Amino acid sequence: MIREEYVFEDVAEYLYENNELLIAGISREDERSHFFLNEWSIRKKDILLVDRRPGEQLYYKFVKNNQVIGENVVDFCIATPRLLRNLRVEEKNVLLDMSSLDHVLIMFLTKQLLTQVVPRALFATYIRPERYNKQYGDIEFSLSSQVLAVEAASGFTKRESTKQTLCSFLGFEGIRLKGVLESVHNVEKFIPIVAFPSGCPQWYNTTMWNSMDTLQSECKDSAVRKCFSESVFEAVELLRDNITPEEKVVLAPLGTRPHSMACAIFACEHPSTRIVYDYVVEHNHRAIGISDITVYHLSTFLKS
């Protein structure tokens, strides 16, 4: 598989000229969340802004030439594919801005765009911050204000099997792994994967340190795999290499947004895959600055 991952500066003009719809989240205090929104607004391009709301609802706003054309709150699972069809996504080159979207939206939209409402071409972007806020209270790299119950991610519900392979992409907060291990039963094989940031190797050490107690007590016989934190393609390859088509799989993306997208891509290829998530509430001030921007050309995964 060719890894079509590019530095934004190298393909920016191509995206500006050829992208016909940006799908992004609502702007937050994290400046990464409105970088692409600002770039597309300056050029008066089509933008679909989306945000999850309580009760399995989706807020959306469609902007064309900097004018709001449509705005509403609809059913998340049922109305989202209809919304994409109404916007004629099948005829467009689409860009998905991961840094502005939460993990559940990234996974759900990835599945819709790969299998249900398939665009002419699909790109995604991810912005690595210059740094994370290191401390909230006594916890180093606590990026979430609240961790909720572990549940199946929307669009990836499957019945629990008697013998399961659990694969978890780990993040800074080790307590999240503990919650997944307590919630997923009948685990025959466990595959922990730690993100390795290309520009900040110390983040890998932090992830290992924060998860060490759980890994040592619950997963003594499990070898830890590594994967570049910003690589969607490497994460998909790692899942393909370590999981057979016959296995009943549970994926728990607790790390980076590109790895959540990779889990969704793999689940679309592997029908017996269930994805679980703990629906964390992220801190508003969790990240500072804009560092490397990666662009992913994902059209190779589109279902014809």
Image (cartoon, rainbow, N blue to C red):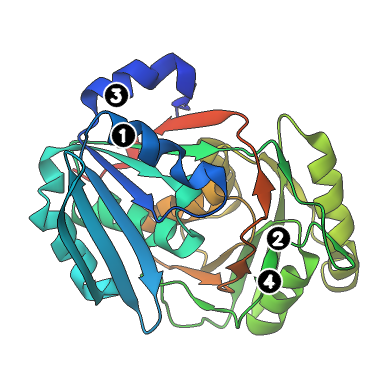
Alpha-carbon span between mark 3 and mark 4: 36 Å
| Residue depth check, mark 2 versus mark 1: number of the one nearer the observer | 1
Mark 3 residue type: Tyr
Q: Which of marks 2 and 1 is nearer the N terminus?
A: 1
Q: Is residue 219 left or right of residue 257?
A: right
Query: Observer-nearest residue: 101 or 162?
Result: 101
Q: Earlier in the sequence, mark 2 or mark 3?
A: 3
Alpha-carbon span between mark 4 and mark 1: 31 Å
Q: Are marks 2 and 3 in contact (CB under 8 Å)?
A: no
| Residue depth check, mark 3 versus mark 1: number of the one nearer the observer | 1
Residue indicated by mark 4: 145
Q: Earlier in the sequence, mark 3 or mark 1?
A: 3
Q: Earlier in the sequence, mark 3 or mark 4?
A: 3
Mark 4 residue type: Ser
Q: Is residue 50 left or right of residue 93?
A: right
Residue indicated by mark 1: 40
Residue indicated by mark 2: 143
Query: Observer-nearest residue: 49 or 184?
Result: 49
